[in-house]
Image: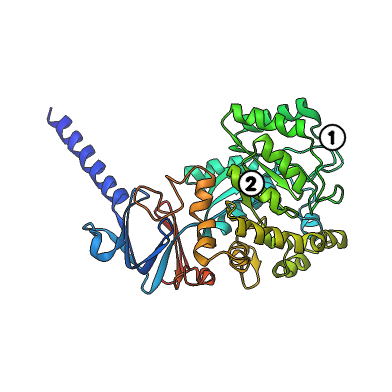
């Protein structure tokens, strides 16, 4: 009996000890925080984090700081929800030097390269990414490893492999899926593999040398077949599209998102707004700030001609989308941390939104709560609200006053764990 009691109390003691270490709250103090839900700044901010989630957040006078908490004092910095980038390819290999470098890459090399990109993305302040088409389902394996906590990276929401047609965007010289029967099969296959969205390519694109960027290459019956199967699984469909006509057909067929939208016109943007269809602009892929990047990766002439072809119309489409009040979620189609114009592709993308007519608050919302809403995850992420995951970054200055404050990002927390603190 005595032995049992001793053993029991030993177990209890160790249980209590490990509990307190694991569940000890963390407290962030900072000069202010941004409430992206209400669109306001809160000065003298305190955020309490317990078990990876936000327990309380607000002005220091309104928040009880629990005893024994680990306090991280960020001084005169501002707290902002972790950034979200809704158009990322972890296995990106664009034509030119970049593709040549990764030619013949085997699956093991691919997974390691993607894990590296995921880690760098997180360290750049991006705590959630949506992957609209990645390679060989390596992204799904990586998603599991990150969820288990064995690898550092953002939360991943993936479409598995993109669903496309022979000769369409993203295709090489192989047969893909043609006609509604094959598209149904391809959609089902991605869902079975673990895709949480389906990504289709309905027009040509910059990175594939054939197929007009503004042409509706996928047919109506093909698009309808994909949407039908996805709906049966409660899964949304987003479409790579440069074409106003293809977009109109796809919106009528029931898609939930449009990527790039190089040649969208006002009529189709209005239709998107009416139907609540999301627009993920990826504006950096066609604008001058990114030309250094194209040079760095040795983009071939035909590629740059396609970039120049869409540049002005793409910009105009974004301006009109802002004017028309289309739902916009931020996506870069470059690696989230890719150097761009003295900052990262994600932050440059947000700055372009302001140049195209958004307020700094709206651009920040596109990179946080709006992205969360697009993913139907606004109860879990996207703002500094009690109950949500503690995905938090810190910057110098208030990004509602000037979105470029994001350029000074130097602190990254995801799920209550600090991954970066430049000011320690
Ligand atoms: Zn893309």
159 displayed left or right of 217: left
Query: How crowded is the residue under tag 2: few (<14 C-alpha within 10 Å), some, or many (20+)?
Result: many
Task: Check mark 2 vs ligand 1: CB closer than 8 Å? yes or no.
Answer: no
Dot 1 alpha-carbon crowd within 10 angstroms: few under 14, some 14 to 19, many 20 or more: few
Disc assigned to residue 334: none
Q: Rounded to the nearest whole Å, what is the CA distance between mark 1 and mark 2?
A: 32 Å
Query: Looking at the image, which residue is at 28% across and 45% down?
Result: 19
Which residue is under mark 2? 272
Residue displayed at 21% across by 39% down: 12
Residue found 56% across the figure and 31% down from its top: 234
Q: Which residue is mark 1?
A: 175
Nearest the camera: 313 or 186? 313
Camera-side residue of 307 and 363: 363
- Nearer to us in this view, 416 or 44: 44
**Taking 75 as reference, is 9 left or right?**
left
Quadrant in which the C terminus appears: bottom left
In the image shown, does 376 or 277 lie closer to the viewer?
277
Color style of the picture: rainbow
Q: Earlier in the sequence, mark 1 or mark 2?
A: 1
Q: Horizontal and vertical percent for residue 91? A: 68, 50
Task: Examine the rendered structure and indicate whether residue 231 appears above or below residue 418.
Answer: above
Tell me, yes or no, whether the two marked residues, 1 and 2, touch with CB atoms within 8 Å. Answer: no
């Amino acid at each position: 009996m005595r032995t049992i009691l001793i053993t029991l109390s030993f177990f209890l003691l160790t249980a209590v000890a490990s509990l307190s270490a694991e569940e000890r709250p963390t407290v962030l103090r900072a000069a202010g925080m941004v409430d992206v839900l209400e669109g306001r700044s809160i000065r003298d901010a305190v955020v309490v984090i317990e078990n990876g989630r936000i327990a309380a957040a607000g002005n220091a006078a309104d928040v009880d700081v629990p005893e024994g908490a680990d306090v991280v004092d960020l001084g005169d910095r501002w707290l902002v929800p972790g950034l979200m980038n809704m158009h990322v390819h972890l296995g990106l290999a664009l034509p030119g030097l970049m593709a040549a470098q990764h030619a013949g890459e085997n699956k093991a090399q691919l997974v390691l390269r993607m894990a590296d990109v995921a880690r760098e993305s997180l360290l750049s302040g991006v705590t959630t990414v949506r992957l609209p088409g990645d390679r060989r389902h390596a992204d799904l394996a990586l998603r599991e490893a990150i969820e288990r906590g064995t690898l550092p990276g953002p939360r991943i929401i993936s479409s598995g492999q993109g669903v496309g047609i022979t000769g369409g965007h993203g295709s090489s010289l192989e047969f893909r899926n043609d006609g509604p029967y094959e598209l149904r099969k391809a959609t089902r296959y991605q869902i079975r593999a673990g895709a949480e969205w389906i990504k289709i390519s309905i027009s040509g694109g910059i990175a594939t040398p054939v197929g007009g960027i503004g042409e509706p290459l996928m047919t109506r019956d093909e698009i309808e077949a994909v949407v039908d199967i996805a709906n049966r699984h409660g899964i949304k469909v987003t479409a790579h599209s440069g074409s106003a006509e293809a977009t109109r057909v796809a919106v009528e067929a029931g898609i939930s998102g449009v990527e790039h939208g190089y040649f969208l016109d006002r009529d189709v943007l209005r239709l998107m707004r009416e139907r609540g269809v999301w627009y993920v602009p990826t504006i950096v892929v066609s604008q001058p700030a990114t030309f250094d990047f194209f040079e760095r990766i040795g983009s071939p002439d035909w590629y740059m001609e396609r970039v120049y072809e869409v540049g002005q119309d793409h910009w105009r489409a974004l301006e009109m989308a802002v004017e028309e009040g289309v739902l916009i979620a931020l996506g870069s189609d470059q690696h989230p941390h890719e150097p761009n114009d003295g900052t990262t592709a994600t932050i440059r993308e947000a700055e372009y939104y302001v140049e195209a007519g958004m307020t700094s608050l709206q651009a920040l919302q596109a990179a946080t709560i709006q992205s969360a809403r697009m993913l139907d995850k606004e109860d879990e992420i996207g703002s500094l609200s009690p109950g949500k995951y503690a995905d938090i970054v810190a910057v110098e200055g208030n990004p509602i006053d000037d979105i470029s404050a994001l350029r000074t990002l130097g602190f990254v927390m995801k799920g209550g764990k600090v991954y970066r603190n430049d000011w320690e």
